[in-house]
Every structure is written in structure tokens, then in C-alpha cells.
């Protein structure tokens, strides 16, 4: 066995010390990064950690309906301000041609706009994550160079049969393994954190727009048809966009960095000629791949839409489970679900088929052509040393063979890493194309939400008719103590249609002053609820004017009862939260009194108290749901209430009591109903005729009220007659009994 010469011993010792310092430096950096990233999580003791872990698990396992709405998890980000939304509007212009999805200027413009949301400034956590991520990427590339050189030395020592040097280099190998593996897992961790960070920002922003004061979640379905299945966009597409974007950063940034560093390293041994060859190779490969790459962006966008359709079909089944089961509709729903799934799967299959040829070509170029080319390059210093330029000089003790072996191994490793980096850059193009697809969907959602927020609806160019959504001229005044329509047409919105909306009620002129209860009646589909929609601001007022009180002073009880997630108390106080209730000094005792009025006083006992959480829509009967709606009105005590057929399943006696109570407590009622029994609780009647939007008003209390009073008198008189007969019979029984005794 060879002994070490002193200079060699010194150089090995200094190299080891250097490596040690590098390893310690890398470990310190990693530790600092871990501290920075995880510093928000309190970890005082193992128990505490376990406890919070259990809490997190509980939160996941308990159905959302049973979790408390009163104590929401801490908000991750502040609400988007109106000023930010106003400033961003200019960047989210409506997309003219959704079909043109791909890696082009439009894609870059859209991505730039989205970056204003996901990376608003450089003083954000996401910017810090990007910086840390980049540091780890540099660290990894540098470690790869170190490993390549070390590999060369190990083989050299092996070929030269230098046992001691071989053993020492193996020790070095393991020493590098620790920071190298840590760096790799930190890169993956930071990538995931970045993706989650982007997703949180985007989701928060979208929620702020989607649930804005203009009810964009309603408008997006009823007044616009550019976005179908917004839930899919928000839950899945945003997540995919963020994942792809974060992974693209490391998939592009790292190989780019690798390419620069490895090329620099390689130039030292394979010379300028080799480098020119390498670059020519890159350019040709990139061109060839670009030419054969199918439009993955468009394919990804279509796939996301079909996923949304499939998910939507399932959601509809869950929402309407009882109705479908009553109709025995399982078979039809089954075929609808299968059809939706097949449409999705055949699209995915066609993508896979397209990928076969593409992947073959890609693999052939990157794995085989590049490797052969790389080996050729490695051979330059061996066969044409004068071409290779500056060749690394042999060190003491290196034989020409071991030197060549070391050079070859180092170059081969660098080549492999370079080919890997190049390959990843080429693969990234495919990912970039997919990102273009997700970007177009996310951007489209954001631009539609922005336009709905600014009252700009989708307009069909050159649409005929008076009532298109780009011609909304009605005036709304919100500080009137009453409800007054002046020359107001009630029109169905017709989003994107080439003919305008349909006129339901023509030139409506009516005033409801406090205490002057109004009943709206008319045939089905004539536009009764439509009037309520216009009052609530859900449908636009195309012309004329509407004066109404502040939003707080009108309460709507819709035709279909809605029961929210949460406790029994939440059902009565909706849309208030428990905090709102306590802030207003309201008590559970009051809620109980309200339930007594609507004849639901047995519910708290039956259901186990106010804190009980259940899927309430499945617990209450139809009539109970409607009475709960009335209970909400009594809780909120508005000045005006619009009741849309909301007592149709309630027995007439309880309905009457609820109406009388509402009037006694000073609520002015606007009732939509077909029931003559309700006439007597109202002062005015608005009858919609349905013929060319005609309507008429009447004052109740004349003919109808007289009729109902007459009927009541007749009923009482006949009951009195029966009382006489019963009294006579009672006396007869008494006499009979006294005779027997
Ligand atoms: N989002 C919508 N877009 C377009 N048309 C709609 C929309 N919603 C309802 N309509 C139509 O508007 C018309 C009036 O509907 P509305 O709900 O006001 O009827 P209604 O008089 O309350 O009927 P009912 O007594 O059956 O409840 C109907 O023909 C209905 O089909």
C-alpha cells in the first residue's frame, strides 16, 4: 500500500477541513431555514405538540356541520380591501378569446396579473420562501459539482489502488450525504410551502370577491354564464395552478442554474469546441421538441372543465338526494353520472395517447441522443486533448490512466447532471403549457368576478331588445322609509343571450308605506318572486326607479327554506353568528319565546339544546323548516319583510297566529301568496295578470274583508245554535240521572 506524501496529507487535511466547514455552513443554513419556517408553530412540550396534532386530526375527522362556526380558525390573511380590488380591476380585463390557450404573450400577461395577488410585495412570507428556495437550489447545484468531483477522485483512488485515500474519500462521501439529502428534502418542503402560500392568497382573494356585498356567487350563476361550476375553479383549479407554478419554479430554476454551473465546469475540461457543440445540441433539441409538442395547455383547460362537470353532477345528486329517491330517479342519475365520467375519461385517454408519441420522441432525444453526444464530448480530452484547451493538470502520484479516469468520471457525472438538467428543462415546457391552461381558468374566474363586482355583465354584442344587461338604467335609492316602484319594468335577466330579457311586469308603480301590508298574487311564473329579487338587488332594475330602506331593514324569507351549517341556535339567528347575538345582548330565553310563537318550542328539548349541531335540513319537516324561517324574521325584527310563499306547508291556524304576531310587532309585510286566507292580514293587493305584463292593485278591506267577516259571523251563529242544542241535551241527561238516583 502506498504511503501519503506530506503535501498530499496536508492537502487532504485541508480539503477535509474545508468540506467540514461547508457541511457545517450548509447545516447551519438549513437549521436557520427550518427555524424561520416553523417559527410560527408553538412547540413547548411533546404533550402540547401531541395535543395540537390531535386537535388538527379532530378538525379533519369531525364533519364540518358539527364544527363550531362561532370559533373559526384564525384568519390567515387580512381581507382584501376595496381599494386593492379597484386598483386590480385594470389587470383583469375580460378574456376575449378563451380558446387561445397556450404559452404566448397573453399567458404571460395573465400570469403577471395573478402575481399581483400571490406576491403583492417582496415583504411577504412567499418572497422569503422563494429566496430560501433559491438558496437551497444553488446549494444543491454546488453540492452536485462537489459530488461529481469526489466521485472522480474515488474512482481514481480505486484505479490507483490507493487504499487510504479511497477510505478518506468515502468518509467525505458520507459527510456530504447529510447536507445533500437535507437540501433535497428542504427543496421539496419549500416548494410545497410556496404552493400552499400562493393558494391561501388566491383563495382568500377569490372568496372576498365571490362573497362580496353584491352577491357575486348569485350573479355568476344567474346574470352571467361565462363561468360554469365556480366551485371547481375555486377548489381544484386554484390548487392545481399553485402546485404547477411552485413546481415549475424549481423545475425550471434548478436546471437553468445547473446548466450554467455545469457548463462552466465542463468548459474547463472539454474546451470551447465542446461547449459550442453542447449549445448547438440544446438549440436543436428545443426547436424539435417545440415543433412536436401538442397544445397541453388547452388540453389541461378542457380536462379541468370536464372534472368540474363530473363533480357538479355528484354535488347535485347529494343536494337533491331525497327528491331523486322519491322519484325513483337513480337509474337516470346513474346514466347522467356515467356519461359525465365517460366524457372526462375519454378526454384523459386521448391526452395519454397523444403523450405516447410525444414521450417517445422526448425520451429518444434526451436520453439517447444526448447521452451519445455527451460521451462524445467526454472523449474530447482523451482523443483530442489540444481541442479540449485547458486540461486539469495531473497531481503528484496521478498516473496518466488514473488522471484520465478521474477526468472521465467527473465529466461523465457532470454530463449526466447536465443532461438531466436539460431534460428537466424540456419536460418543464410541457408543464409550462399545462400551467398556461390553469392560468387561463384562474384568470378567467378572476376577471369575471372583477367585472361582476363592478356591475359589468356579460353582454351579447348587437343584442336585440330593450333589456340587455349592458343597458341597466334604473335608479335605486336606499334611504326611503317604505318600498316604492316608479315606472319600473320587472324583467328576467338574459345573460349572453342575443335577445334581451323577458318583460314580466310592465311599468310597475306601487308604494308600500310602513304598516300598509301588501299581498302580491297571480298565476305561476308571472313574476311575483321576480319583484322580490329586484327589491333585494339580485336582479337589475332596467329603468324607472326603486326607493327602499337600508338593507338591514328588509328581511326576505324565500320560497325554499334554507338551513345553515351549525348549531340549533344558528338556525334561529341566521345570518347572525353567536357573537353578533351576544353583542346585541340577545339571550337564549328570547329565542325560546320566539320558538313558542312559531310553535316550535319543543325543538330545543327534543334536539338536546341550543348547542346541538346536526344536518338540520334532514332533521326538520317541511312545515318546521318554514316555521324556522318565520322565527328568523321575529329574531331580526326588521321594518319590512318579504315573505315568498314561505308558509305554504304550515297549518292555517299557526300561519294566522304568526301573521298576527308579525303585524303586532310592527313588521310591514309584503307577502307573495295564492292563499285567500292571508288576504285579511294585508291592506293592499297587487295582482299580476301575466298578459303582456299587466297588473292591478286593490285595497283589501272592502269586498273581500266584508265577505270574510260575513262568513265568520255565519260560522259563529251556527256554532251558537249548536250550543243551545247541547245545553238542552245536557239538561235532559242530568234529569235522567237524578231520576235513577
Ligand atoms: N335566473 C333566471 N333567469 C331567467 N329567467 C328566470 C330566472 N329565474 C326565473 N325566471 C323566469 O322568470 C319568470 C318569473 O319567475 P318567478 O319566480 O318570479 O315566478 P312566480 O310568479 O314567483 O311563480 P310561482 O308562483 O311559481 O313561484 C318565470 O317564467 C321563470 O321561469
Image (cartoon, rainbow, N blue to C red):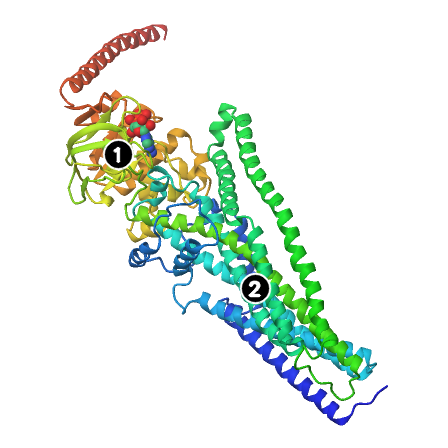
Q: Position of 690 compared to 337: left or right?
A: left
Quarter occupied by the N terminus? bottom right
Check if mark 2's residue and mark 1's residue have beta carbons within 8 Å: no
**What is the x, y in percent for residue 253?**
54, 66
Q: Is residue 191 visible?
A: yes
Q: Which residue is mark 2?
A: 189
Quarter occupied by the C terminus? top left
Label 1: few (<14), some (14–19) or many (≥20) C-alpha neighbours in 10 Å? many
Tell me the SS state at disc 1: helix
Q: Is residue 72 visible?
A: no
Closer to the chain start, of discs 2 and 1, is 2
Give the foreground label among 2 and 1. 2
Tell me the SS state at disc 2: helix
Judging depth in this view, the residue of 516 and 8 nearest the camera is: 8
- Displayed quadrant of residue 117: bottom left
Label 2: few (<14), some (14–19) or many (≥20) C-alpha neighbours in 10 Å? some
Q: Which residue is mark 1?
A: 532
**What is the x, y in percent for residue 606?**
44, 37
Judging depth in this view, the residue of 179 and 46 nearest the camera is: 179
Asked whether mark 1 lies closer than 8 Å to ligand 1, one says yes
Q: Position of 555 compared to 338: left or right?
A: left
Image quarter for ligand 1: top left
Residue at the right extreme, as displayed: 1
Residue at 34% x, 27% y: name it.
650
- Displayed quadrant of residue 160: bottom right
How many numbered marks does the figure carry?
2
**What is the x, y in percent for residue 107?**
44, 54
Amino acid at each position: 500500500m502506498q504511503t501519503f506524501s506530506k503535501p498530499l496529507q496536508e492537502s487532504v487535511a485541508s480539503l477535509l477541513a474545508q468540506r467540514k466547514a461547508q457541511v457545517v455552513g450548509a447545516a447551519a443554513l438549513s437549521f436557520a431555514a427550518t427555524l424561520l419556517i416553523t417559527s410560527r408553530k408553538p412547540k413547548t412540550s411533546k404533550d402540547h405538540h401531541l395535543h395540537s396534532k390531535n386537535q388538527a386530526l379532530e378538525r379533519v375527522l369531525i364533519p364540518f356541520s358539527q364544527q363550531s362556526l362561532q370559533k373559526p380558525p384564525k384568519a390567515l390573511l387580512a381581507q382584501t380591501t376595496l381599494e386593492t380590488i379597484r386598483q386590480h380591476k385594470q389587470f383583469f380585463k375580460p378574456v376575449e378569446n378563451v380558446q387561445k390557450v397556450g404559452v404566448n404573450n397573453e399567458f404571460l400577461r395573465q400570469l403577471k396579473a395573478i402575481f399581483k395577488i400571490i406576491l403583492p410585495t417582496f415583504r411577504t412570507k412567499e418572497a422569503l420562501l422563494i429566496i430560501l428556495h433559491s438558496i437551497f437550489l444553488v446549494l444543491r447545484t454546488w453540492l452536485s459539482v462537489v459530488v461529481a468531483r469526489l466521485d472522480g477522485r474515488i474512482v481514481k483512488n480505486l484505479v490507483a489502488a490507493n487504499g487510504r485515500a479511497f477510505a478518506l474519500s468515502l468518509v467525505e462521501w458520507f459527510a456530504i450525504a447529510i447536507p445533500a439529502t437535507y437540501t433535497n428534502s428542504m427543496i421539496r418542503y419549500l416548494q410545497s410551502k410556496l404552493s400552499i402560500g400562493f393558494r391561501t392568497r388566491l383563495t382568500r382573494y377569490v372568496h372576498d370577491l365571490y362573497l362580496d356585498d353584491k352577491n357575486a356567487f348569485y350573479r355568476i350563476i344567474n346574470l352571467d354564464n361565462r363561468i360554469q361550476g365556480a366551485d371547481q375553479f375555486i377548489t381544484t383549479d386554484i390548487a392545481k395552478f399553485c402546485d404547477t407554478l411552485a413546481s415549475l419554479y424549481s423545475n425550471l430554476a434548478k436546471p437553468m442554474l445547473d446548466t450554467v454551473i455545469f457548463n462552466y465546469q465542463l468548459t474547463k475540461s472539454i474546451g470551447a469546441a465542446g461547449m459550442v457543440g453542447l449549445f448547438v445540441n440544446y438549440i436543436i433539441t428545443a426547436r424539435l421538441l417545440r415543433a412536436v409538442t401538442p397544445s397541453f395547455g388547452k388540453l389541461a383547460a378542457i380536462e379541468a372543465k370536464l372534472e368540474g362537470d363530473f363533480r357538479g353532477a355528484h354535488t347535485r345528486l347529494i343536494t337533491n338526494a331525497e327528491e331523486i329517491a322519491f322519484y325513483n330517479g337513480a337509474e337516470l342519475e346513474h346514466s347522467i353520472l356515467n356519461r359525465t365520467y365517460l366524457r372526462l375519461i375519454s378526454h384523459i385517454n386521448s391526452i395519454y395517447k397523444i403523450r405516447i408519441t410525444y414521450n417517445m420522441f422526448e425520451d429518444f432525444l434526451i436520453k439517447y441522443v444526448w447521452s451519445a453526444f455527451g460521451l462524445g464530448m467526454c472523449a474530447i480530452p482523451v482523443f483530442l486533448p489540444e481541442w479540449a484547451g485547458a486540461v486539469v493538470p495531473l497531481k503528484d502520484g496521478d498516473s496518466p490512466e488514473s488522471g484520465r479516469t478521474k477526468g472521465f468520471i467527473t465529466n461523465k457525472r457532470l454530463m449526466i447532471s447536465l443532461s438531466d438538467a436539460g431534460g428537466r428543462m424540456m419536460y418543464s415546457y410541457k408543464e409550462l403549457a399545462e400551467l398556461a391552461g390553469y392560468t387561463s381558468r384562474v384568470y378567467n374566474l378572476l376577471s369575471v368576478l372583477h367585472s361582476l363586482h363592478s356591475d359589468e355583465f356579460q353582454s351579447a354584442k348587437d343584442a336585440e331588445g330593450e333589456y340587455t344587461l349592458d343597458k341597466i338604467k334604473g335608479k335605486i335609492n336606499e334611504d326611503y322609509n317604505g318600498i316604492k316602484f316608479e315606472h319600473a319594468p320587472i324583467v328576467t335577466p338574459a345573460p349572453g343571450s342575443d335577445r334581451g330579457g323577458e318583460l314580466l311586469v310592465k311599468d310597475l308603480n306601487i308604494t308600500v308605506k310602513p304598516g300598509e301590508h301588501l299581498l302580491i298574487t297571480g298565476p305561476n311564473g308571472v313574476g311575483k318572486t321576480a319583484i322580490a329579487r329586484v327589491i333585494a338587488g339580485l336582479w337589475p332594475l332596467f329603468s324607472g326607479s326603486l326607493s327602499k330602506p337600508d338593507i338591514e331593514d328588509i328581511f326576505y324569507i324565500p320560497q325554499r327554506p334554507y338551513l345553515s351549517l351549525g348549531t340549533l341556535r344558528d338556525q334561529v339567528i341566521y345570518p347572525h353568528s353567536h357573537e353578533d347575538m351576544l353583542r346585541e345582548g340577545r339571550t337564549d330565553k328570547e329565542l325560546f319565546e320566539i320558538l313558542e310563537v312559531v310553535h316550535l318550542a319543543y325543538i330545543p328539548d327534543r334536539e338536546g339544546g341550543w348547542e346541538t349541531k346536526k344536518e338540520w335540513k334532514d332533521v326538520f319537516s317541511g312545515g318546521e323548516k318554514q316555521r324556522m324561517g318565520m322565527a328568523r324574521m321575529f329574531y331580526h325584527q326588521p321594518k319590512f319583510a318579504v315573505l315568498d310563499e314561505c308558509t305554504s306547508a304550515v297549518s292555517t291556524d299557526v300561519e294566522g297566529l304568526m301573521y298576527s304576531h308579525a303585524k303586532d310587532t310592527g313588521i310591514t309585510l309584503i307577502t307573495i301568496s295564492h292563499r285567500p286566507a292571508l288576504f285579511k292580514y294585508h291592506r293592499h293587493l297587487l295582482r299580476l295578470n301575466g298578459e303582456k305584463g299587466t297588473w292591478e292593485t286593490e285595497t283589501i278591506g272592502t269586498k273581500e274583508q266584508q265577505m270574510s267577516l260575513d262568513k265568520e259571523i255565519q260560522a259563529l251563529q251556527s256554532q251558537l245554535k249548536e250550543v243551545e242544542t247541547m245545553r238542552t241535551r245536557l239538561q235532559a241527561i242530568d234529569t235522567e240521572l237524578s231520576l235513577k238516583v
